[in-house]
Amino acid sequence: MYAISPAIHAEEMGYAMSRLEIDSDVSDDGSAIFEDCTSQPTKKPLNYLDNEISQLTKLKSTPHQLLGQVGPGRPELPVSPVKLLAGRESNYSGRGRFSSADCCHLLSRYLPVNGPSLIDQMASRAYVSQFSADGSLFVAGFQGSHIRIYNVDEGWKVKKNILAKSLRWTITDTSLSPDQRYLVYASMSPIVHIVNIGSSETESLANVTEIHDGLDLSSSDDGGYSVGIFTVKFSTDGRELVAGSSGDSIYVYDLEANKLSLRILAHTSDVNTVCFADEASHLIYSGSDDTFCKVWDRRCLNSRGKPAGVLMGHLEGITFIDSRGDGRYFISNGKDQTIKLWDIRKMSSNVTNPGYRSYEWDYRWMDYPPQAKNLKHPCDQSVATYRGHSVLRTLIRCYFSPAFSTGQKYIYTGSHNACVYIYDLVSGAQVATLKHHKSPVRDCSWHPFQTTLVSSSWDGDVVKWGFDGSAEVPPLSAKRRASRRRNS
């Protein structure tokens, strides 16, 4: 038997799992929290981002120069759909159709801000929710042991209802294999389970109706206590898993050999987030409560497990990392209430900790100190910083918007104050705020090809946002919300 780690995390303590929390203005210790969730864009956007990534974003989302030209040196953006159609007829792209930049320029103007429409309601908190790579499936994981997989193309019908095995506290993460045949799920345990979702069974009860194989990530040097897995991800080829834990470590599991192939004591505190940088899977990004983002190159790891580089800039722990997929840029969400954009070419080999923190604060039950909101890391290596959302109580997640429909022009995030925020990557402006939920929005996911976004919250709701005419499921009515509250 394992003993529970003394370094217990916010994801596994302090909450009554049997009670569905509806009101977001009450913290878990009962004290009131007052936060504004305005739907208006921020009046103080960032300084215009002058970096290579701004040029890359423009190239991916700006149509042919002849379409926007209204005079010498006078481009006019955005270009109207009529002009885009005219450009297609004139074959400006040279392909007899819209270029990918034309498509992104048009589609990125139609943000998924209308709705929401109800997908599902559960009597426990939603912790994770993600589209598959092709957008045909959607996965949502709940604290009450349930993981549901929805068939998006069949009206969001439940394809598989998984009841997790040996759950500790909550489902902390899930990941679909690239071929969409398998799903792995993690909780506050060193055992990650894998399920065959291609079977005909709709109800997947662990080791009763289906086998949930356990993959043991523990090792002899874990200190004698049970680590919890905060994050787990498939590699692009589906042959490996990468995971981060409360044991300050990164794990790589070889699925073909069915064994742990690599363990790195990577940080000095919980590794809350980890992911592969690109399709090659050589580079790994990690983020920790020690405030550092680290880059690991598996091709040149020595026995001491030294990272390829360290990126400093967050003042508090890091809750999530999302890679742009190019092996160069990524974003991170931090408990200092910011998202930061990073270029790994700016990383350093040494860690600098100037001791900037002069206050006591715990994000699990306290508001962020007002005196800390204007602090800046003296060695900030980030490219840009985005503010407006709140990162409290749980590991809030953030993402780049899809490449196909937006050219990754935006970043978006859940928030403790029950909203979803969308920021313009280049200007830093808050371009949309989605309001519906009554409790923290821990996760959200933008469809890879459609103008659709799904948000999931601790209030138990999984809802879909789109633009006018895109709704495919019934809107959430006040009557149904009231009924859900009475039953909870």
Image (tube, grey):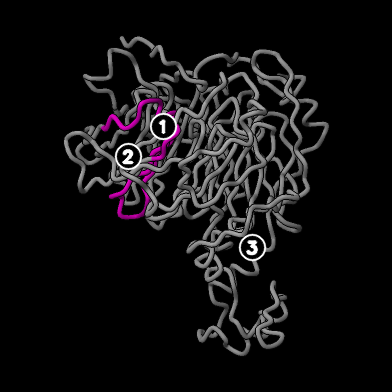
Residue 99 in the image: x percent, y percent?
54, 76
In the depicted structure, whether residue 63 falls above or below residue 310: below
Q: Is residue 327 left or right of residue 134?
A: left
Q: Which residues are magenta?
A: 264-293
Residue contact at pointers 1 and 2, CB within 8 angstroms: no
**Taking 104 as reference, is 477 above or below it?**
above
Who comes first in sequence, dot 3 or dot 2? 3
Q: Which x, y percent locates residue 284?
A: 34, 44
- Numbered tag placed on residue 108 in the rendering: 3
Choose between 152 and 339: the one closer to the eye.
339
Farthest residue in the bottom direction? 90
Left or right side of 297 for 16: right
Disc 3 residue type? Ser
Mark with earlier residue (3, 1)? 3
Q: Which residue is mark 2?
A: 350
Expressed as whole percent of the image width and height from the top left, the position of residue 94 reads: 51, 86
Classify residue 122 by image quadrant.
top right
Query: Which residue is identified by label 1?
Result: 353
Q: Amino acid at mark 1?
A: Asn
Instruction: Classify the position of the C terminus by image quarter.
Output: top right
